Amino acid sequence: MTISRKARTARTLLAATLALGLGLGAGAVSMAPANAATAPFVATPNGMVGITQEILVFAPRLKGQPITVGFALGSAGTSQQTVVGSNGYAYMNWTPSLAGAWTISGLGNALSVGSTTVNIAAMPTTTNLFVPTSATSNAVSVVAVIVSAQAGTYAPQGTVSLASAFGNPVGTQQLTPIAGSANAYATFDWVPQVLGTFPLIANYTPGSNGTLASTSETANSLIVSNAGVVELRLPTSFRVGQPTVLSALVTPTTTVGSAAFQLNGGYLSGSIPLVNGVSTTQWTPTQQGNQLITTQFSSTAVGGPSGAVSQPVNVLPALPADVISVSAPSGPWGPGRPISIARGTKTQLSTSAASGTSVLMSESGPCSINGSVITGLGAGTCTVTATSVGSSAYAPTSVKFVVTVTAPPKKRR
């Protein structure tokens, strides 16, 4: 089984396109190992909510027959069907929806494969807060919050609370999933009543155990007595290589027209029509350091308003790749080190990541991974991949290990 990265998906905030998340999906199906063990079994690695993983079933007496595999966690459960191949192996993809200890069992004619229990970790999330760079006191300003799963296919569910960094609440909103992505959003009508710099912070509270809570960085908005006709709404931070969203907000929101974006005085986007007073574009910084973002608004109404506003931002370096460690009782694994296991033996693996997130394991070749135990099914070479979905401090990464499965020594007569 392999787990491979998918491209970052586009998401819609209000009527605009967003691209803030990373997904991981199942890769190609493993080739059936030769000289495999004869006892039937069902196996899959420990996993994470929202990430597809492969289920391997060995049922040599059911060649060519359809089988059913059940998945149970407390009162939650589901089942899937597949067909056993001529080599006695069957494969299926499963995407866990809740965190916990899932029991996976053969059902019906597949009772002989038994069952296994694997641990599914909750998906880490990041909460991104988008505030107007300037807002008018005693007037409505729209603040947006996007909660993104670090990977996978499920959009976070639950609520977001917005408050000042001093603890004064602004409100709580239910998240709305962004179709076709692992992201959800909420918007707040915020009426600042003071002048000067005002800090805001957003907190995500999960609606199930499938995701982990997260808190945004503190975002600062300058509250003035009379803001311009167009303002920028920006995220709290920028990083090299990390796609982000830039929005132009025009008051009143019924204004018709379009806004264009510039970077350091050069082209960043063409004119983008307003939708509910907002124009949005995507920007992926390519260099760190101070940058200048400008938006220019023009009304399409006769005698309508126009304006421009600029905001300096500091682009931070790209996140460092997560550091993954994998070890067996015989010692730590390394991508360039010789690793071997004997056919038919079970080896317990220990994993860790600098980010603190769970390490996902997958394999291809004459091996199986069940939970965190790797078994050599037949003599040959396996490729084992350890993957981290990353965190707010580390970028996702994966490490591949080449594992040689050796045949056990022949018994002397």
Image (cartoon, helix red, strand yellow):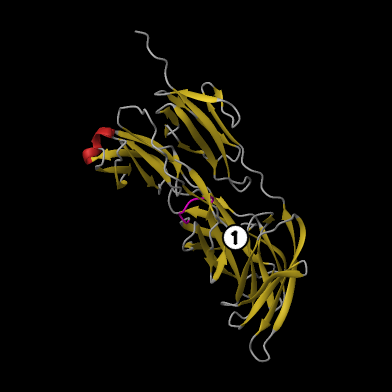
| Residue positioned 30% across, 31% down in the render | 40
- Of 197 and 250, the residue lying toward us: 250
Q: Position of residue 404 (x, y in %)?
A: 49, 27
Q: How many labels does the image show?
A: 1
Read off the residue under disc 1.
163
Q: Can residue 268 be seen in this view?
A: yes
- Residue with the most extreme top position: 413
Q: Does the magenta stretch include residue 153?
A: yes
Asked where in the image residue 334 lies, by quadrant, the reply is top right
Compared with residue 235, is residue 34 higher up or lower down, i.e. above or below?
A: above
Would you say 229 lies left or right of 97 here?
right
Which span is picked out in magenta? 150-155
- Of 300 and 59, the residue lying toward us: 59
| Residue positioned 24% across, 33% down in the render | 61
The amino acid type, in three-letter code, at marker 1 is Ala
| Residue positioned 44% across, 45% down in the render | 28
Asked where in the image residue 101 lies, by quadrant, the reply is top left
What predominant SS class does the magenta segment belong to?
A: loop
Q: What element carries label 1?
A: strand
Compared with residue 347, is residue 241 higher up or lower down, i.e. above or below?
A: below
Which quadrant: the N terminus? Answer: top left
Q: Position of residue 26 (x, y in %)?
A: 45, 47
Crowdedness of circle 1 by 10 Å Cα count: few (<14), some, many (20+)?
some
Q: Where is residue 130 in the image (x, y as percent from the top left)?
A: 62, 63
Would you say 369 lies left or right of 228 here?
left
Q: Where is residue 96 in the image (x, y as percent from the top left)?
A: 40, 47
Compared with residue 107, is residue 150 higher up or lower down, i.e. above or below?
A: below
Q: Does the magenta stretch include residue 222?
A: no
- Of 376 and 316, the residue lying toward us: 376
Q: Can residue 136 be seen in this view?
A: no
Which quadrant: the C terminus? Answer: top left
Would you say 226 lies left or right of 107 here?
right
